[in-house]
Image (cartoon, rainbow, N blue to C red):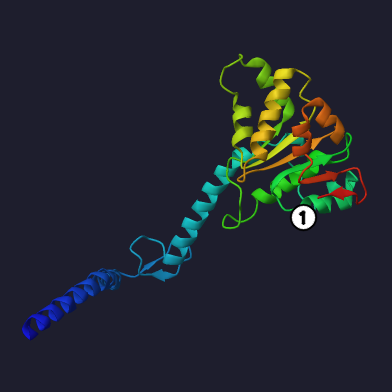
Amino acid sequence: MKHDDESTTRNEGGERLQSVGETIFPWLSDIQARLAAPMRECPKCHEMTLSGMGTCDPCTQKREAEAEEERHRDALAPALESVKDRFRWAEFGHPDFAKYEISAPAVAKCRAIPLRGIITLTGGSGVGKTTAAVARFHAELRVPRDQRRWGYTSRFIACREIGRETMTHKIGSDFGPKTREAFAAHLLVLDDLGAEGESKPVAERIEDIISERADSNSCVTIITTGLPLDKIAARYTDAIGRRVSQNAVIDMAARGRTKG
């Protein structure tokens, strides 16, 4: 019995040594290969390197990081390009915010409010609703990759675009591309609610988008509208009126008067 125990112990010890060897030997082989390689000058930083790849390790890592950042920018391009040309400048702190005389308290609220559910920006024409919404949209998409919460599907879509698609697609046919994006976007700016026309099919499509997104825990919708909240309920449904006002409403024409 003692002999069997000793044999088992030796076997277990041998297995551990084999496991350690499998881990260490490839690493040692790599070190040996590097030591055997001739010294060469890195073509990027001109430091002498043992790397057989042509560039030194820091330069290789930098190149890989730059390539990853470029892939990230390319993936974000559709989201950023979805914004209307005349609003692509909109960034918090941009000098044109002062030129347009947008309410500073309202902008501060829009910049700081936690993104969840539906956030509605209200006010008449020219008060800065779309500008503030785009600035927040840009702010969320431009954070570092490891801190960004919102996916590459994020979009800026005008309600007029939804209206045009709804009227041009046959009844019962598949959604148009803008409508599909509006349903799927992680972060959506739904611009100018009420400007899409008064067609019943269009109103129902807008209602579907808002309702589905309001029920989701994985997406956020920033709505801009020139309609007063009571007119939204009258134009669409009471349920839509409640949804656009239940989380946060920012009056962009007000000087410090916000809800949420």
Where residue 157 appears, as percent x and y from the top left, is 69, 33
Q: In the displayed orientation, state which residue is furthest to the top.
A: 170
Secondary structure beneath disc 1?
A: helix
116 with respect to 29 (left or right): right
Q: Is residue 62 above or below residue 50?
A: above
Q: Amino acid at mark 1?
A: Ala
Where residue 85 appears, as percent x and y from the top left, is 73, 35
Tell me where residue 23 sits by quadrant.
Answer: bottom left
Q: Is residue 124 above or below residue 41?
A: above
Of 235 and 194, nearer the camera is 235
The residue located at (93%, 49%) in the rendering is 255
Where residue 155 appears, as percent x and y from the top left, is 65, 38
Mark 1 lies on residue: 112
Q: In the displayed orientation, state which residue is furthest to the right.
A: 255
* Quarter of the picture holding the N terminus: bottom left
247 with respect to 30 (left or right): right
